[in-house]
Amino acid sequence: MLGIYPFLLLIAFISSFFSLGFAGYPLVAIIAIEIPIIIRIYKKPKKTILKYSSVFIILLCVITATLPDYYNYRYQETNINSDKKLPLLELYNSRNEPVVFNKNKIIVLDIWTSSCGICIKQFPKFEALKNELKNDTLIQFYSLNLPLKRDVRKKISKYTQPYSFDKLYAGNEVQNQLKINFVPKYIIIDKNSNIRYIGSLNTGTFEFYKNFYTIINELKMKILNKVVLLCLTLIMYSCKKTENFASIKIEHKEINFGTISSKDTVTKIFKLYNSSDVPLKISKVGTSCGCTGAILSDSIIKTGDFAEIQATFIPRPGEAGVVKNSIVVRSNTSPSFTTLYLKGNVE
């Protein structure tokens, strides 16, 4: 009865050599643990054997469930351009028209060649994934064929013809640009044209390492966070504008005092009305020259009320001709500066 355990493990160990590369390391570890246990409990009571066997079976189930993650980690490419800008690629659609990716979408590429049987067998899985997410407008699925010298476009297109995902064909330098050593290979590109992942298509329940859904959800969450941040910024700006900005209304922003002599002094009144729902606060009143003075009657104006600026112009000795002096009012309005003008003629 006990001899069946090493027999089964031996079969699993031998079969592992037929996988891509040598994939039997976890099974070697299982055998290394199991053989000493079998030797130790071989002549023990049946209850003890059953106890150890149950623990081992549970351990074997756990290891089996985590094997996909082990293989995904071990056989990923080590020279990929992950998290770097996507280079400018020479790409064509089925009509031989140049293609540029939509920067408002997350791009998923299925890289394949006509000599790769596994690639072609994986197309139904890629198609199913595309159909599963067909209502997600943020994601675009493409197959991308890397050209071989023997390829004829019309002949190799038969492999992708039954599927609805978009078909692309690469220029001669694309494989070197992306540093693709073998296929099938899958690439995920974010909205900023950054390569976020290059590797296998990991969609299994127990494939936690570089899981496709996890990567896509993280990218979508980043997009959502940016949208939320933008909305919050706009809301905060809107609230700030509503709460803090007042509106100022002035009957006459420009007053002409007429003609005076160089010995006269002229005074005019500007009325500032608060036409908003918040207090209008005048923080500063300045003039363009020392010949003009401005006196504010009240720096805080309630809603519906008004304040006056008494503007006085005193011509400088020998001054003659047309004058136009400005009075600048700074307040809690948007924009924060309002300019008034006092003009006339000096004889």
Image (tube, rainbow, N blue to C red):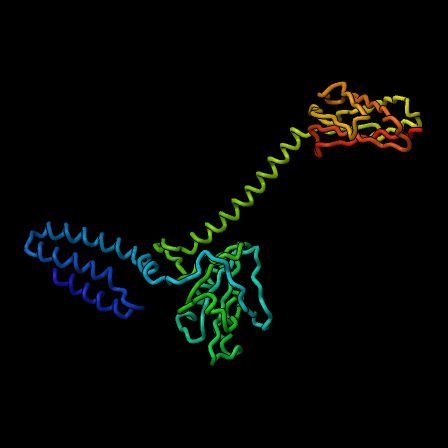
Residue 204 as seen in the image, left or right of residue 306: left
Residue 330 as seen in the image, left or right of residue 70: right
Q: Residue at x 36, y 56 (%)?
A: 207
Residue 278 as seen in the image, left or right of residue 231: right
Q: Position of residue 260 (x, y in %)?
A: 92, 25
**Residue that extends furthest to the left in the rendered view of this protein:** 43
Q: Residue at x 88, y 21 (%)?
A: 265
Which quadrant of the figure contains the N terminus? bottom left
Q: Position of residue 238 (x, y in %)?
A: 64, 35
- In this rendering, is residue 240 above or below 140? above
Q: Residue at x 71, y 24 (%)?
A: 282
Which quadrant of the figure contains the C terminus? top right
Seen from the viewer's position, the closer of residues 209 and 311 is 311
Seen from the viewer's position, the closer of residues 134 and 239 is 239
Q: Position of residue 226 (x, y in %)?
A: 54, 45
Q: Residue at x 77, y 28 (%)?
A: 287
